Image (tube, rainbow, N blue to C red):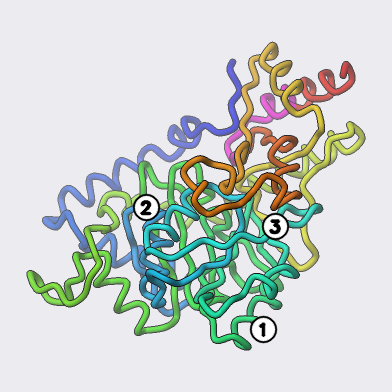
Amino acid sequence: MTTRVWDYLAEYEDERPDILDAVATVFGSGQLVLGASVRGFEAEFAAYHGAAHCVGVDNGTNAIKLGLQALGVGPGDEVITVSNTAAPTVVAIDGTGATPVFVDVREDDFLMDTGQVAAAITERTRCLLPVHLYGQCVDMAPLKELAARHGLAILEDCAQAHGARQGGTPAGTTGDAAAFSFYPTKVLGAYGDGGATLTSDATVAERLRRLRYYGMEDRYYTLETPAHNSRLDEVQAEILRRKLKRLDTYIAGRRAVAQRYADALADTGLVLPPTVPGNEHVYYVYVVRHPRRDDIIERLKAYDIHLNISYPWPVHTMTGFAHLGYAPGSLPVTEALAGEIFSLPMYPSLPRDLQDKVIHAVREVLATL
């Protein structure tokens, strides 16, 4: 059996009656856009986090973009973030007309090096955008202090951190707003695209609702621009409502797989993912590090195991962002990681026999390097 980093079919077989009932519920509801399912999911997702407002949108990229716009970010502004992230984080910043400004990540946990943020702040800085990467949170305390001192907004990128916590506080509730993706691979994944922006600021929430719907507050009357159609689909919202009830179970399953990997691979020479003290990791992906990464991935194909790299190209090195002017070597830790990190299979329904297969194959390959 081919083993990949993610698969949903076993989970679907287990949850099929509920998923199909969700679809039937929407189709029989008489309202297919911004109906009871979107409203219900928004209320329940906000309540899960202890936040006041959740605004469902069509994908995680627009959750970031509209979140930034609702916080007042626009052309001429700067947003400080990291390059060790999926491109959509930076695409969303660029989409507002603002300029992304990168700081490096930490060597030990690959998260934003918050000690570099103060030096990156200029008179044009409007927002700090930490990425809660791979399933755990960036250290938010120094960012909160910097934001308060300089009058900056904080938008948390929580696309990989559904259910993660720091000091008992849910990811997405420390800053002014937070963006979530419900792409199918996520800890809380839809059966297609979806996203949401979380906030406890009523004014920000009102702007978000307008921005996702052509800038309209009343039907047919556009109140503000730029805005476009970015609504969360009613079917996806109903599926997410059902899956939200199982989110803690999904997280427990991911942690169980991670613990098996940690126990079985501790003596292999792989650098395994640490959990930062105070964090509660949800293991969206299980990212390991080795200087011979490419050899390992290639040799594992002989075992019919196909792995992924998150991420092989730092955003600042991509042709599409060459205009930002970051020279090779400008973010040394990020660039070094890109040549050494890779992801082992990680999802809650990963069968135990496939876990054993991965562990055995990885140990064998590492022993022959």
| Label 3 packing within 10 angstroms: few (<14), some (14-19), many (20+) | many
Residue 104 bears which disc, if any? 3
> Looking at numbered disc 2 in the image, what kind of residue is underneath it?
Asn
Q: Is residue 286 left or right of residue 177?
A: right
Q: Is residue 335 left or right of residue 51?
A: right
Indicate whether 233 appears above or below 301.
Answer: below
Secondary structure of the residue carrying numbered label 2:
loop
Residue 59 bears which disc, if any? 2
**Residue 355 painted magenta:** yes
* For marks 1 and 3 on the same chain, the one whose residue lies earlier in the sequence: 3
Q: Residue at x 25, y 67 (%)?
A: 226
Say whether residue 310 is visible.
yes
Place of residue 221 in the rendered image (x, y in percent of width and height, measured from the top left): 9, 74
Q: To which quarter of the image does residue 345 belong?
A: top right
Secondary structure of the residue carrying numbered label 3:
loop
Using the image as rendered, state which of residue 145 and residue 261 is in the foreground.
145
Secondary structure of the residue carrying numbered label 1:
helix
Which residue is most to the top?
Answer: 302
* For marks 1 and 2 on the same chain, the one whose residue lies earlier in the sequence: 2
Q: Which residue is mark 1?
A: 145
